[in-house]
Image (cartoon, grey):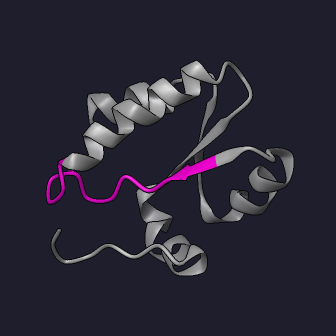
Amino acid sequence: MTDVLEALASHPACDVLRKADIDDFLARNPRALLFFAGDVSARPEGLDVAVVVRELATGYQGRLRVGLVDRRDEAALMARFGVVVSASW
């Protein structure tokens, strides 16, 4: 994990989520943002988004929970939530 993602993961409003945890996380957090960082070596813009997500979590002062989806479960959860990554902009 990169320093930027580590900073997000260590934010008090962020939980790193595995597939088994997602339903409980969403049930406990009516205002939740799921963040799929993806392969930041292939798409480094994910790191820029991680910075913004961390700022949102800070700005919402406890009213927003961030779920940083563990890379090992991204593919399964992307399919479940209909997340699509386009080949190009």
Q: Which residue appears farthest toward the front when viewing the image?
A: 89
- Residue at 46% over, 66% down: 74
Q: Residue furthest right?
A: 28
User: Tag count in the figure?
Assistant: 0
What percent of the width, then of the height, locates residue 5? 36, 36
Which picture quadrant has residue 27?
bottom right
Residue 1 seen in this snapshot: no
Name the quadrant of the N terminus.
top left
Horizontally, is 10 left or right of 49 in the view?
A: right
Q: Is residue 25 above or below residue 4?
A: below
Which span of residues is magenta-colored?
A: 33-44
Horizontal side of 21 relative to 83 (left or right) equals: right
In the picture, residue 65 is in which quadrant? top right
Residue at image coords 59%, 74%: 81
Say if residue 67 shows up in the picture.
yes
Residue 24: x percent and y percent?
A: 81, 55
Question: Relative to 35, is 15 above or below?
Answer: above
Residue at point 14%, 60% (across, down): 42
Magenta stretch holds residue 15: no
Q: Is residue 35 magenta?
A: yes
Residue 10 location, x and y as percent?
51, 25
Magenta stretch, overall SS: loop
Is 33 on the left or on the right of 68, as rendered?
right
* Left or right: 8 in relation to 47: right
Residue 43 in percent (x, y) is at 18, 56
Q: Which quadrant of the rendered structure holds the C terminus?
A: bottom left
Where 69 falls versus 2 (above or below)?
below
